[in-house]
Amino acid sequence: MLFLEESLLPIQIRPYQEADRPFLRTLYLASRKEAFFWLDSSDWKLEDFDRKVIGEKVIVAEQDGKILGFASIHLHENFLHNLFISPDAQGQGVGSHLLGIVEQNFTRTGSLKCLVKNEKAVTFYLSRGWEIISTGDSETGEYYLFHFRIKR
């Protein structure tokens, strides 16, 4: 059992279950709209979640039966594809706990891409020891490629 840093209330990190899908769809859509406020979200749909996690390991953070966030990982690539926290649970240590579990799943250097304009997430990853390796361009804007080196 993991604990939230500020509230010390128990938080559980567990594997995804199919029963999580409806809530994670809603969480993914709401979190994306908040995080990527500068993008046009008019075409975003609840079903986007389904496409974005195909073939990935998904882990869920919950507290007292309430889902607080999730992460999805391409295990073979050691790539963190998604890390989203419910807007009302941000700043409570949920992301740090999920990221810690993600890092434990890496078998070698881990990586992720984060949009440069998502300054809150960039600051978060840097504070957790991730390093910016390069930049690139995508259809949604410039991004940083981050690496996380496993400490053995």
Image (tube, rainbow, N blue to C red):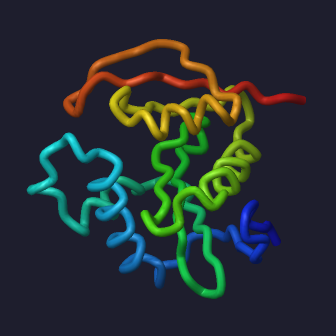
Looking at the picture, how far across and down is residue 142, in whole percent?
A: 30, 22
Q: How many badges with numbers are in the image?
A: 0
72, above or below 4, in the image: above
Q: Nearer the viewer, residue 45 or 64?
A: 64
Quadrant location, the N terminus: bottom right
Q: Nearer the viewer, residue 135 or 76?
A: 135
Q: Residue at x 53, y 44 (%)?
A: 74
Looking at the picture, how far across and down is residue 93, in whole percent?
A: 66, 57
Residue 57 horizontal side relative to residue 37, left or right? right
12, above or below 113, in the image: below
Residue 24 horizontal side relative to residue 137, left or right? right
Residue 27 sits in quarter: bottom left
Q: Residue at x 62, y 21 (%)?
A: 131
127, above or below 30, in the image: above
Residue 126 sits in quarter: top right
- Toward the right, the furthest residue is 152
Q: Residue at x 74, y 36 (%)?
A: 107
Residue 69 horizontal side relative to residue 130, left or right? left
Q: Nearer the viewer, residue 44 or 126?
A: 126
- Toward the top, the furthest residue is 134
- Toward the front, the furthest residue is 6
Quadrant location, the C terminus: top right
Q: Residue at x 38, y 36 (%)?
A: 118
Looking at the picture, how far across and down is residue 144, in whole percent?
A: 44, 22
Residue 76 sits in quarter: top right
- Toward the left, the furthest residue is 42
